[in-house]
Image (cartoon, rainbow, N blue to C red):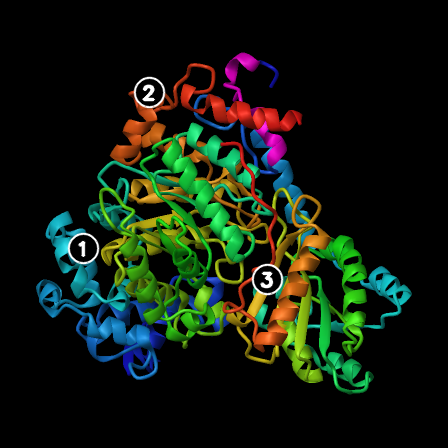
């Protein structure tokens, strides 16, 4: 039982789970779930009460029962009590002060990370403003490697996302070329296949691996099929760089995705055994997003931001190369408008980074949400200022397969120009060698197609005349 | 807008014919040129408006009658578009009148139920539901599947099919639904297939065939996939993530 008096009214919260939910900044998904605060006052009361909760409390009061949920067991069983020691005496409110203080440096934040549970991090984020989320996330540094080094200071990586409504290979090749010529793709060249068809997945894997090998691009590929499809592809000796999976923060939600921790473990081992990385072997790519657990009726009474943060416990077990919060993807029933999407993106980035994850953000919205390009520009700019690891690169922001709007190749160039953020060092060298970028981290102004790509573009040109 | 000296054009604009994606847009400085920017705004405005157009099931029902198929119009518990958007749980449930309407159609052993729901794009259903069913229905008749009237559901989500399949104790459940409108494809239809669907079935139990529209998957390609899923699920007695779509895919060919 948690109790607090504000403005002469006493509020009771019967569990930490309820307190967390009521303390959450407003968003449509929590109203949909029936867990949101009933009034502004109740929300602030919950935030006051939450600020008084000792961080240690999260180690004894599980938000989803230990016995019934393997994500809870993972969180509790993998907690590093030695890493936790420097902050173990703090309350949630103190923890916010500590994070903003000079005690919290890149080094100390990395050191305490294994001692943090997702719930501690979610809790503190609920009493932090946008500027707090940005400032603290900026201090975190998470570096991962496969064929390039992702997450270094003053770098911003991009996922090239060349989707096509029918997985047409030429269409995908055309978008891939477009993206590469705009300097995009160092985080991954990742295709969402239109179907979970194994043959199509195999063909796309070969297509991407051919492109990466032919042009010796220091990047990695991924076909975002279900993990079981990718496992079959590995059995068939397909060139799998990264294993993709959508993950969520409760066992039940993961079951609705057709996965569990054992299956992810199996996939992780299988991908590692291929040893396809050159500078490292982080070989998992996870996607998450607030609302996914509720959309599977599996939120277990949690608010969606706490659910989301619990998914990061699943992610960090497998040392991923990339984690992507697809923030506005599911729709307005979870994040209603631009304001809710922006806050959620920055919360996810902050929480993920604090937990030691290479957080990217699919800064996006659907056509039934109250959002537009202006909202995305605000999140894009704030995410980059916060030191976000990577963003999506979709031709002209329009994903013609998934039917939503994300960030574009031009958006990444905007950030490079504005904040002088460079791609991964390996990719930056490649871009310069191919004369796609000049030495100032900008697209070459000279007209014409870089020599390396002329044959491919001419071949495609001939196809068009046949 | 006509001063081309201010824009860097891309020399690979001919690649646009291979994809509806917005490639080779060129740039002003490093940014999107004015024309591309305004084209985006135009497409967004059209897609936003597409979400709010209400479905008219009348012509669809008439077309299906001419195929000798009965239909029944049902409503979800989402009473209006705003409620539909904010309360997906209500879009998954039939309202009381719907159950009364179903009772008018006597229960007998049923193999397959077909549901047509507006979803997020009524125009997708308006354009694609009947042409697709014209191809599908002969195959179902060939298999001598027993099928109740086709359910036309207003403000329905995918899982509305679960209640209907359960009501009829149907083995196979096919939901045709309007997908959320994209900028370049405001009329895209999706098909969700579930074996032994019942209340509480999850997304892991379903198979999805998406992007059925003029620039996307053709009706025949979608039909091939659906027939494969139906036949395989009958053998395996399940659907979902463990039923992999291994129907033959077009041989891929690319320019590298």
Q: Which mark is residue A91?
A: none
Which dot marks residue A438? 2
Residue occupying image coordinates x 56% and y 39%: B253
Question: Quick check: A362 left or right of B52?
Answer: left
Q: Position of residue A216 (x, y in %)?
A: 34, 32
Report in which chain the residue with disc 1 lies: A
Comparing labels 1 and 3, the label whose residue is closer to the camera:
3
Instruction: Please identify, in this view, whether the residue under mark 3 or under mark 2 is nearer the observer.
Output: 3
Q: Can you say which quadrant of the picture contains the C terminus of chain A?
A: top right
- Would you say residue A7 is visible in this rendering? no
Q: Are the residues flagged by discs 1 and 3 from a single subunit? A: no
Residue numbers of the magenta segment: B4-18
Q: Nearer the viewer, residue B199 or A126?
A: B199
| Element under disc 3 | strand
Q: Is residue B14 magenta?
A: yes
Query: Which x, y percent locates residue B50?
Result: 69, 50
**Residue A81 point in image, percent of width and height:** 12, 70
- Are the residues at dot 1 and dot 3 in contact (C-beta closer than 8 Å)? no
Q: Quadrant of residue B179?
A: bottom right
Above-or-below relation of A262 to A415:
below
Residue A99 numbered mark, or none: 1
Q: Give the prevailing secondary structure in the magenta stretch.
A: helix
> Quick one: which residue is furthest to the front in this view?
A236
Label 3 crowding class (10 Å Cα cut-off): few <14, some 14-19, many 20+? many
The residue nearer to you, when weighing A131 against A171, is: A171
The vertical placement of A60 against A309, above or below, is below
Q: Residue at x 18, y 59 (%)?
A: A113
Q: Is residue B4 left or right of residue B152?
A: left
Give the percent coordinates (x, y) of residue B116.
73, 66
Q: Nearer the viewer, residue B38 or B131?
A: B131
Specify which label sits upstream in the sequence, 2 or 1. 1
Which residue bears the numbered disc 3? Answer: B208
């Amino acid at each position: 039982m948690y109790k607090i008096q504000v403005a002469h009214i006493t509020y009771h919260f019967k569990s930490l789970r309820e307190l967390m939910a009521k303390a959450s900044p407003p968003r449509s998904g929590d109203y949909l779930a029936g867990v949101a605060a009933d009034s502004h006052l109740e929300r602030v009361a919950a935030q006051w009460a939450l600020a008084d909760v000792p961080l240690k409390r999260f180690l004894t009061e599980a938000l989803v029962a230990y016995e019934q949920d393997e994500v809870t067991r993972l969180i509790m069983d993998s907690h590093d009590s030695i890493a936790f020691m420097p902050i173990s005496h703090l309350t949630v409110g103190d923890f916010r002060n500590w994070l903003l203080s000079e005690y919290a440096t890149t080094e100390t934040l990395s050191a305490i990370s294994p001692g943090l549970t997702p719930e501690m991090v979610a809790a503190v984020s609920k009493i932090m403003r946008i500027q707090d989320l940005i400032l603290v996330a900026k201090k975190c540094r998470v570096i991962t490697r496969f064929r390039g080094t992702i997450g270094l200071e003053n770098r911003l990586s991009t996922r090239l996302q060349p989707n096509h409504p029918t997985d047409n290979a030429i269409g995908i090749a055309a978008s891939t070329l477009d993206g590469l010529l705009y300097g995009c793709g160092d985080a991954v060249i990742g295709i969402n296949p239109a179907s979970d068809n194994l043959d199509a997945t195999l063909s796309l894997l070969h297509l991407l691996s051919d492109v990466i090998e032919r042009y010796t691009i220091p990047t990695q590929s991924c076909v975002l099929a279900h993990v079981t499809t990718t496992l079959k592809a590995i059995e068939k000796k397909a060139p799998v760089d990264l294993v993709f999976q959508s993950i969520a923060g409760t066992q039940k939600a993961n079951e609705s995705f057709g996965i569990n921790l054992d299956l992810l473990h199996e996939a992780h081992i299988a991908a590692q055994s291929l040893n396809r990385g050159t500078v490292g072997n982080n070989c998992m790519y996870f996607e998450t997003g607030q609302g996914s657990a509720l959309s599977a009726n599996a939120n277990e009474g949690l608010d969606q931001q706490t659910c989301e943060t619990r998914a990061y416990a699943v992610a960090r077990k497998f040392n991923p190369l990339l984690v992507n919060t697809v923030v506005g993807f599911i729709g307005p029933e979870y994040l209603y408008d631009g304001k809710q999407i922006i806050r959620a993106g920055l919360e996810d980035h902050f929480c993920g980074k604090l937990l030691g994850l290479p957080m990217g953000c699919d800064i996006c919205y659907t056509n039934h949400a109250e959002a537009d390009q202006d909202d995305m520009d605000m999140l894009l700019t704030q995410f980059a200022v916060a030191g976000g690891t990577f963003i999506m690169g979709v031709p002209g922001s329009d994903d013609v397969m998934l039917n939503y709007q994300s960030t574009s190749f031009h958006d990444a160039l905007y950030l490079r120009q504005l904040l002088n953020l460079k791609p991964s060092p390996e990719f930056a060298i490649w871009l310069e060698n191919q004369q796609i970028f000049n030495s100032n981290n900008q697209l070459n102004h000279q007209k014409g197609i870089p020599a390396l790509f002329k044959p491919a573009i001419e071949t495609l040109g001939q196809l068009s005349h046949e | 807008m006509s001063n081309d000296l201010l824009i860097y054009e891309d020399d690979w604009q001919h690649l646009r014919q291979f994809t509806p994606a917005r490639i080779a847009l060129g740039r002003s400085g490093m940014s999107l040129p004015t024309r591309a920017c305004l084209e985006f705004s135009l497409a967004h405005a059209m897609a936003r408006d597409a979400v709010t157009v209400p479905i008219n099931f009348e012509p669809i029902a008439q077309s299906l009658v001419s195929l000798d198929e009965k239909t029944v119009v049902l409503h979800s518990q989402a009473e209006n578009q705003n409620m539909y958007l904010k309360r997906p749980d209500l879009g998954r449930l039939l309202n009381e009148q719907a159950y009364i309407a179903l009772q008018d159609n006597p229960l007998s052993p049923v193999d397959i139920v077909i549901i047509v729901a507006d979803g997020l794009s009524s125009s997708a259903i308006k354009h694609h539901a009947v042409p697709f069913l014209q191809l599908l229905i002969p195959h179902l008749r060939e298999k001598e599947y027993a099928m109740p009237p086709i359910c036309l559901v207003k403000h329905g989500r995918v899982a509305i099919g679960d209640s209907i399949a359960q009501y009829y104790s149907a083995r196979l459940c096919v939901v045709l639904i309007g997908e959320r409108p994209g900028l370049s494809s405001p009329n895209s239809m999706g098909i969700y297939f579930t074996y032994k669907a019942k209340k509480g079935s999850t997304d892991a139990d379903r198979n999805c065939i998406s992007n059925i529209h003029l620039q996307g998957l053709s009706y025949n390609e979608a039909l091939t996939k659906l027939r494969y899923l139906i036949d395989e699920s009958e053998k395996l007695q399940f659907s979902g993530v463990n039923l992999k779509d291994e129907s033959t895919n077009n041989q891929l060919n690319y320019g590298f």
